[in-house]
Amino acid sequence: MKKLANTEVKINKLLAERWSPRAFNPEFIIDNELLLSLLEAARWAPSCYGDQPWRFIIFQKQDITPWVSALNCLSVGNQNWAMDSSMLIVICANKVFDHNEESNRWAQYDTGASAENICLQAVSLGLSTHQMGGFDEEKIRNLSNIPEQFDILSIMAVGQALKESKFTEEQTQKEKTPRKRRALNEIYFNNKWK
Ligand SMILES: Cc1cc2nc3c(=O)[nH]c(=O)nc-3n(C[C@H](O)[C@H](O)[C@H](O)COP(=O)(O)O)c2cc1C
């Protein structure tokens, strides 16, 4: 299902087409070529000092035991729909710069940019993404042995959006809720705050 952004002025098609579905095709498997294409997109995000603080842990449905373990780290509400996606990406940020080992206060900013690159590349490949903050951080840290130096920012579900004709009634209700955004003139100021 498409859920195009209802924009006040025209924006790039890729941006307008990205949205976060909860109804995924449970049969769909992401092959290595698609996976690498998403990660390559992440790799080319800008970052402070070119530090590239992002790291990703990949869980694919075809590797069923770790997949189920990762799914169990999500909140129950997220598990209910993310189980139908094809891949979970745990998104981590290095809190410390590589070049001088000092605190990197832009690590989260940069890692967010790399995550958005994944989302947009996914749209260009006919895939969909849905990022989640609803997960047990300690559980996923232990499961994947993620060092304390790395913040765990989100877990992203990736898959193929389910065709509307296959929606259950509950999915129809959830997927059809309108997307909301603040008005354009609410999010920026000229020269001074307000
Ligand atoms: C960091 C982050 C955390 C999120 N956490 C959740 C979550 O735990 N569960 C969920 O269903 N959606 C989650 N979302 C998805 C947002 O609700 C969604 O992006 C927002 O409503 C805008 O919708 P759109 O992505 O379709 O434009 C999260 C998104 C982001 C960026």
Image: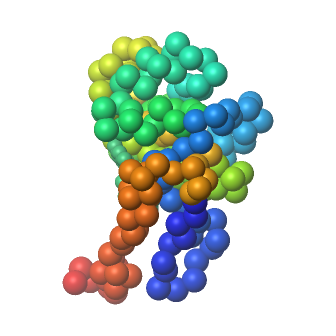
Query: x, y (%) of residue 153?
Result: 38, 38
Front residue of 145/77: it is 77
Q: Residue 186 in the image: x percent, y percent?
A: 30, 81
**Image quadrant of residue 149?**
top left
Residue 104 in view (yes/no) = no
Kindly tell me whether residue 57 is visible in this rendering. yes
Q: Quadrant of residue 39?
A: top right
The residue under the point 61% across, 17% down is: 63
Is 28 on the left-hand or right-hand side of 167? right
What residue is drawn where x is 66% and y is 42%?
A: 38
Residue in view at x 47 percent, y 85 percent: 8
Residue 177 position (above or below residue 170): below
The quarter of the image holding the C terminus is: bottom left
* Left or right position of 29 against 178: right
Point 57% across, 50% down: residue: 166
Q: Residue furthest right?
A: 33
Tell me the quadrant of the picture where the N terminus can be found.
bottom right
Q: Position of residue 71 (x, y in %)?
A: 43, 26
Q: Is residue 148 above or below residue 190?
A: above
Count numbered badges in the picture: 0
Q: Is residue 165 above or below residue 29?
A: below
Colour treatment of the image? rainbow
Residue 78 drawn at (x, y percent): 36, 38
